[in-house]
Amino acid sequence: MRRLTLALVLVLAGVVAGLVVSGRMRATGEATGDDQTTAAPARPATRADAAPTLNTGPDFTRVAEQTTGAVTNIASLQVVRRQASPFANDPFFQYFFGDQDDLFGGRSRRSLSLGSGVIVSNDGYVVTNSHVIGENLRSLPEVTVALADKREVRGTIIGLDPPTDIALLKIDVKGLPVVPWGDSSKLQVGEWVLAIGSPFQLSQTVTAGIISATGRANIGFSEYEDFIQTDAAINPGNSGGALINTRGELVGINTGIFSQSGGYQGIGFAVPSNLAHTVVNALMEYGEVRRGTIEGIRVETIAPAYAREVGAPNTSGALIVEMSRASGAYTSGLRPGDIITAVNGQTITDPSHLMRLLADAPVGSQAAIRVWREGRSIDVRVPVASSGRNRQRR
């Protein structure tokens, strides 16, 4: 019995020892991946395993490729006659002595203006700035439009609108690339835009930036100011070029820069596409823009001292500093010293805002004008006349 018991104990100890050893080996194999039935198959390394590349910014290559072909160079050559004689307009002197321009050094000079333009229809309509066409529109400028494919074509002036600094040309070429009109009212500050033009005669130059502000006025570029401000580089020669959004749409016509050095300083201005489009449609139909105004008055901004003197609540509005007694404005009840505070229910912020609202009013209508006079508000109705000085058709 003693031997049998010892044998059974030894057999049981062997079984237990075997179970323990096999369990440890299995655990070790699972920890080290030796179990080939569960391990993932090996694969060669690919480019996807490499470190991701850095995003260096937005890619404008597609938009630039779509739009640069529709931006042109524009050259306007005109002959400006200068009369140096102090008696040039004296009929008595002219009767006895004739034309004395040679005596007093009067002569003609050639003036060359360079800029950019945007093709807005495939049958040859080109938008640019009126100041690109020239300083003296009576001298019939010779306008040449250089296309992206290096062709140079004579341009015909359809019409100009100096108050907005917009001009419309026509070239006799079909099948041209076009930049579609965009909606400038949807622009947001911080939105990416491209400026395309010919700065310093470098054709189809593309610069990028953002919308810095909208509705800029009182800059001194034109009479009717409602500019888009951008930090996309705009330099001399960019005038009349395209301001493009990331969808490849025309949202502005580049017009000017604010600079103390004459070069780029990150402050550029463009006419909004909605305004430019309205002007272009009017020039196509009438050769002019039929714009409303109040005749016989001159307005200025309101100085804080004057606002305090007359008891005005603030400096918003437009101060009438001069007016004609023969005007409809005087007959309707407006007087020098009045502060125009609202037109047709819209509050006036400054003289430029007043001019924009009047320009959009139908010619021949009656504008409801609210003015501040002697410590109280007065309502008058004033006839809206045509500005009558925009027609420059060729």
Image (spheres, rainbow, N blue to C red):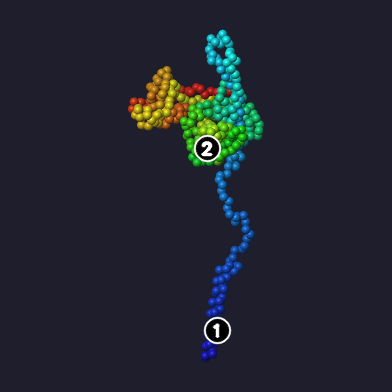
Q: For the C terminus, give its image quadrant.
A: top right
User: Mark 1: which amino acid?
Assistant: Val
| Residue 62 image point, x, y percent | 60, 42
What residue is pinned by disc 1?
11
As drawn, 344 above or below 60: above
| Residue 192 image point, x, y percent | 53, 41
What residue is pinned by disc 2?
266
| Residue 143 image point, x, y percent | 61, 26
Which of the two residues, 183 or 204, is positioned nearer the viewer here?
204
Tag in front: 1 or 2:
2
**Residue at the spot x=47%, y=34% of the render?**
215
**Residue at the spot x=65%, y=34% of the render?**
149
Which of the two residues, 298 or 177, is positioned nearer the viewer here?
298
Nearest to N terminus: mark 1 or mark 2? 1
Toward which corner of the image does residue 106 lie, by quadrant?
top right
**Residue at the spot x=59%, y=25% of the render?**
157
- Can residue 273 be seen here? The reply is no
Secondary structure found at label 2: loop
| Residue 254 image point, x, y percent | 54, 33
Residue 144: which numbered mark, if any?
A: none
Which of the two residues, 321 or 46, is positioned nearer the viewer here?
321
Q: Is 330 displayed left or right of 393 in the figure?
A: left
Q: Residue furthest bottom?
A: 1
Q: Residue furthest left?
A: 375
Secondary structure found at label 1: helix
User: Mark 2: which amino acid?
Assistant: Gly
Which of the two residues, 98 or 191, is positioned nearer the viewer here?
98
Query: How many marks do you count on the picture?
Result: 2
**Alpha carbon of mark 1 to alpha carbon of mark 2: how far?**
94 Å
Toward which corner of the image does residue 320 lie, by quadrant?
top left
**Residue at the spot x=61%, y=23% of the render?**
110
Q: Is 176 displayed left or right of 371 in the figure?
A: right
